[in-house]
Image (cartoon, rainbow, N blue to C red):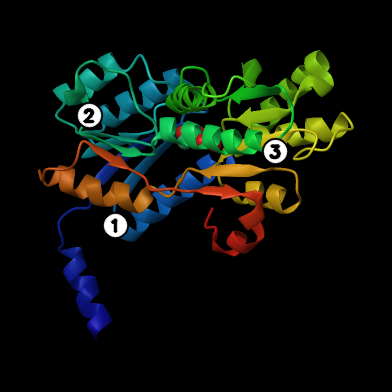
């Protein structure tokens, strides 16, 4: 009876909120978990989600945003693949009076009124945390110099720019820490492996440390290091970011030294903020995700608690 009643009353409820969401792609474990979080939260909240996967291409995201505007959705949310080049399409959304929420990655626009809020991590801080771990590790090693190779994320993306900056800021405090090679691996395992192979070819045993802007590139690189006959996590110290299950497995196997957490579970927060925005309620301009650091020593104990 109760069930029938609630079914009836929901039939008369206000029409569901319609959200257009443009996702970066499916490049990493992080991204897959982020997509699941958003889709699940929309379903749970009764939000009608129009989801578009941009396959890591900005032009596809711009097309998706324009199509959401044409469909007159209630709210647009997106995770911008790169930081720049958004002014025009965001002005179109504003002209159509459709509020825009940024999730995960920031944009570089001068007019801050082009989006309502930005929900996501502090990537500079993540880079600093990675650097801090290395600074501590360096105190325990006798080497006169530690040669670092860096696998950067997607060129022009907020996490690649900020994670590089934060890391450099901290390791700059110790002159024995030196980045000898730095190249993009586009946040994927395949590219991470490919670029690490090139690093190994060029520098071989000179490499002491790998800093990867995400776990997937580190996991790809681990394979390259093993294929080169070296021991990842020992011959080459490996630091990465995200904290996905694959990273915990690699740490438990002794192949990865530390991962800095970056949570992809933004769905529930996004849905609740979207409701407030559409209802005209004030929301904070920046909502920062809370996260930690997991060194290999705690991996086995933490693994069962991991949700992505
Ligand atoms: O670290 C990486 C993904 O923007 C925080 O994108 C996200 C990053 C994440 O592909 O794995």
Q: Quadrant of the N terminus?
A: bottom left
Q: How many marks?
A: 3
Find disc 3 in the rendering and name its residue.
219
Find disc 1 in the rendering and name its residue.
46
Circle 3 SS class? helix
Q: Are marks 1 and 3 in contact (CB under 8 Å)?
A: no
Q: Which residue is drawn at the image coordinates 46% and 17% (left, top)?
A: 156
Q: Is residue 178 left or right of residue 47?
A: right
Q: Are marks 2 and 3 in contact (CB under 8 Å)?
A: no
Q: Which residue is drawn at the image coordinates 76% and 51% (left, top)?
A: 253
Q: Residue 105's spot in the image, x, y percent?
A: 39, 31
The CA span between labels 1 and 3 is 37 Å
Q: Which mark is residue 115?
A: 2
Q: Is residue 152 left or right of residue 144?
A: left
Which image quarter: residue 98? Answer: top left
Please tell me whether residue 297 is drawn above or below residue 77 in the rendered image.
Answer: below
Mark 2: C-beta under 8 Å from nearest atom of ligand 1: no
Q: Residue most toward the right?
A: 229
**Among numbered discs 1 and 2, the one appearing first in the sequence:** 1
Q: Residue 248's spot in the image, x, y percent?
A: 64, 51
**Among numbered discs 2 and 3, the one appearing first in the sequence:** 2
- Please state which of residues 74 and 268 is positioned toward the viewer in this rendering: 268
Circle 2 SS class? loop
Mark 1: C-beta under 8 Å from nearest atom of ligand 1: no
């Amino acid at each position: 009876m109760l069930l029938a009643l609630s079914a009836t009353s929901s039939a008369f409820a206000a029409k569901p909120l319609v959200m257009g969401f443009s996702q970066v792609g499916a490049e990493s474990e992080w991204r897959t978990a982020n997509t699941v979080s958003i889709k699940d939260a929309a379903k749970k909240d009764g939000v009608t989600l129009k989801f578009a996967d941009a396959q890591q291409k900005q032009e596809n995201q711009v097309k998706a945003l324009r199509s959401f505007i044409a469909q007159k959705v209630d709210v647009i949310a997106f995770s911008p693949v790169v930081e720049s080049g958004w002014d025009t399409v965001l002005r179109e959304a504003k002209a159509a009076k459709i509020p825009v929420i940024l999730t995960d990655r920031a944009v570089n626009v001068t007019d801050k009124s082009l989006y309502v809020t930005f929900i996501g991590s502090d990537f500079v801080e993540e880079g600093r945390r990675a650097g801090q771990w290395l600074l501590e590790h360096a105190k325990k090693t006798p080497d006169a110099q530690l040669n670092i190779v860096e696998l950067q994320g997607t060129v022009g993306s907020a996490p690649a720019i900020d994670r590089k900056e934060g890391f450099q800021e901290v390791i700059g405090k110790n002159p024995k820490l030196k980045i000898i090679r730095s190249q993009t691996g586009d946040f994927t395992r395949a590219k991470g492996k490919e670029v690490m192979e090139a690093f190994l070819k060029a520098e071989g045993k000179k490499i002491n440390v790998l800093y990867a802007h995400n776990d997937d590139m580190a996991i790809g690189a681990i394979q390259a290091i093993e294929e080169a006959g070296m021991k990842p996590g020992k011959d080459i110290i490996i630091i990465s970011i995200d904290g996905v299950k694959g990273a915990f497995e690699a740490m438990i196997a002794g192949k990865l030294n530390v991962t800095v957490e970056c949570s992809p579970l933004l769905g529930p927060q996004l849905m609740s903020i979207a409701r407030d925005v559409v209802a005209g309620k004030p929301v904070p301009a920046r909502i920062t995700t809370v996260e930690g650091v997991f060194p290999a020593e705690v991996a086995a104990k933490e693994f069962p608690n991991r949700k992505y």
